Amino acid sequence: MKKAVFGSCEPTPHSLTQEMLLSILNSLGDGVIVTDGEGRVVTMNRMAVQLTGCTLETAQGQLLPQVLRLSHPQYPNLLAELMQRVLREGVSTGLPRDTRLVRPDGLDYLSATLAPLGGEQQGLVVTFREINRHRQLEDSLREQAQREHLVRQVASRIHRSLDLATILQTAVAEIRLCLQVERVFVCRLLREDWGEVVHESAAPVSASLLGQQWLFSDGVEMRSLRRGEVVAIADLQETAREADWLGQLQRVPLGSALVTPIFQGQRLWGLLVATDTRRGRAWLTGEQQLVEQLALQLGIAIDQAQLVQQLRTLNSMLETQVQERTAELQQALNAAQVLYTVTEQVRRSLDEQQIFITALDCLGRALGADYCWVALYDEAQMWATIAYEYLPNETLPSTVGTRIELGHYRELYQRLLDGEVWHYPPVDLLPPVYAQFRQVGGQMVLAPIMDDQGVMGELGVALARPQRGIPMDLVPQVANQCAIAIRQARLYQQSRAQVVELERLHRLKDDFLSTVSHELRTPLSNMKLALKMLGLTLRKGNINATKQAKLLQYLEILEQEYEREAQLIQDLLLLRHLDGTCEPLPQVSLDIQQWLPGMVQRFASQAEQKGLHLTYTLDPQLTQVTVHLFSLERILTELLTNALKYTPPGGTIHVATERLPHHWQLQVTNTGVEIPPQDLERIFERFYRVPRHNPWEHGGMGLGLALVQRLVTHLGGRITATSGQGRTQFCVVFPLAPAS
């Protein structure tokens, strides 16, 4: 390769031309560098040496990028790419904007042109100049325009928007572009000595400070800021800082900072901070005035936006709550509708098979399920058998009848046996029959079917694509409904078996009562005949008066006991008759005004012997009633007998009648005794007697009131009992018209 040497000293015409050319190049005010075809420096003029800081002797033979070192934010290999283009295409080209020349003492903005050598010579001619002054003037004008634009922008934002976050974010972004700094952020004071970075605009390579909380000690800078002064810090690393906000900025690390207070009224609301990585930056007066004006505008915006923001926040919270409640309500309504449908369908049947089939069909259709199943456990909870399924894809084989040994999948089934619902069970824990339906991104829920007696089985649902609007929590609810329905169905079956057994026992009881009544009636008849003959003999015999009196007393006792046994048998037979028939009893018209006094008079002597007051009251509007006379007499007899039996001496027994619009009532009230509330509900049960210290004091089998209630019911009436305040009252209500 032949090189052209411009520095030769031989006195030839050719060398004179080179010297003349070199002189011309040195007289130029622009730097000039000439390279060969490989891009290596051949020569350069004085201005090029001055601008690059590289001597001619050092530069000769080096590649052009090693001498003319350029920097551009977007093109790291800018000069090499431009050289290849010029040498390849033979055209001239310039440098893009923001290209800088890297010098030992710093960076200079550069304007340059690359052109190919003419003629047969291969190489480049590069002419360049520094444009710092032009660039500074241009930058100054641009910065001034940006500042004016920024102030207008922020002011416009304040007038057009009351969103504080938008205003602050716009402000920090625009200020950073205007000041050409590494970062601008707003730190809001949460309290007097504590703040948080809430908005930030930073260079892409810078670590974010958003969310950091800093301590603000009462230093010189903070005192100045609280007085409303702008604090310009040229070098943050000049002195060691405490562990406060300035110390935090030191550790970022940052070189300089411009801090401006933001006031809301008279209160220091926060700080507007501009930072730069360069140390020793002198913050210009115009820059300080700019951020001070913007901080004032931001303070106004904060005042205006805070109330609106509070209103918006409240409104947003209310809207969010309404939406959440609406969504929850809609989900609840959807779930309730499905649950209602399942419940209604399930309740219509007491057949266990029909219950499960209906529940799976309703649940599968509502959720859009790909597979639903019910597996029932054996009594030892060792095996699970899939008993029912919902499988809309008819091409898949049925899983009904598949048996699963619970011990092989202990982790899965232990949770189910403990009563837990399992959402999204891992595939590796599932039996193969279930795992085939566990799709990636899908849903699967297994819920135990359990009641108070334990876990009966499981209800499972698998969906390849989750269904919106209906929560999967519906699955355990349906499982609970199934458990209730199954328990009811099984109880129904048990109750039917018990009813059959009770009917059998009832027949045995009737047979027993008939047999007992017959066996008792025969000897009682003989006893009655013998007693009658004994009475006649005693009354006609020649027995002295003393012996005759004792024998008559014994005879009277025998007659009373006979009557009591006969009455007991009659009551048993009457109860059996009333239980076994629904035929109406013959009714007669009765004058209650004449009938009741005669009935009460029958018990007058007994009441007088016990020292009781027996009274009655007749409703003059109640004269004629239609009843079964024997039943009415038996009802009143039993009520008065009970009253006489339990009323203490000195007490009162009162019988009253009253006409009602469509009924008439008979009341028997006695004083001096009360029935406990827990016993009041059971006094009409057969063979039930109110517990007392001496249960045999008053005798009786507990059949009287049971017989009264059955007679009243058979006559179409009703009987109630109340007790309190030293009195007990039985009230019997009959219809005025005959009972059908």
Image (cartoon, grey):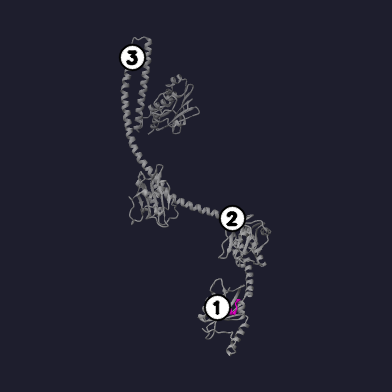
* Range drawn in magenta: 52-63
Asked whether 582 or 737 is in front, the reply is 582
Give the x, y percent position of residue 232: 66, 63
Mark 2, Cα crowd under 10 Å, few <14 / some 14-19 / many 20+, is: few
**Depicted 483 relative to depicted 87: above or below:** above
Asked whether 305 or 11 is in front, the reply is 11
Tag nearer the camera, 1 or 3: 1
Q: Amino acid at mark 2?
A: Leu
Q: Quadrant of residue 51?
A: bottom right
> Residue tagged by mark 3?
536
Q: Amino acid at mark 1?
A: Gln
If you read the primary sequence from the N terminus, does the residue marked by circle 2 or circle 1 appear first?
1
Structural distance between the alpha carbons of marks 1 and 3: 165 Å
| Element on which disc 3 rests | helix
Mark 3, Cα crowd under 10 Å, few <14 / some 14-19 / many 20+, is: few
Looking at the image, residue 340 sits to the left or right of residue 199; the answer is left
- Residue 353 at least partly seen: yes
> Residue tagged by mark 1?
62
> Residue tagged by mark 2?
311
Asked whether 657 or 332 is in front, the reply is 332
Q: Amino acid at mark 3?
A: Leu
| Element on which disc 1 rests | loop
Give the x, y percent position of residue 576: 34, 30
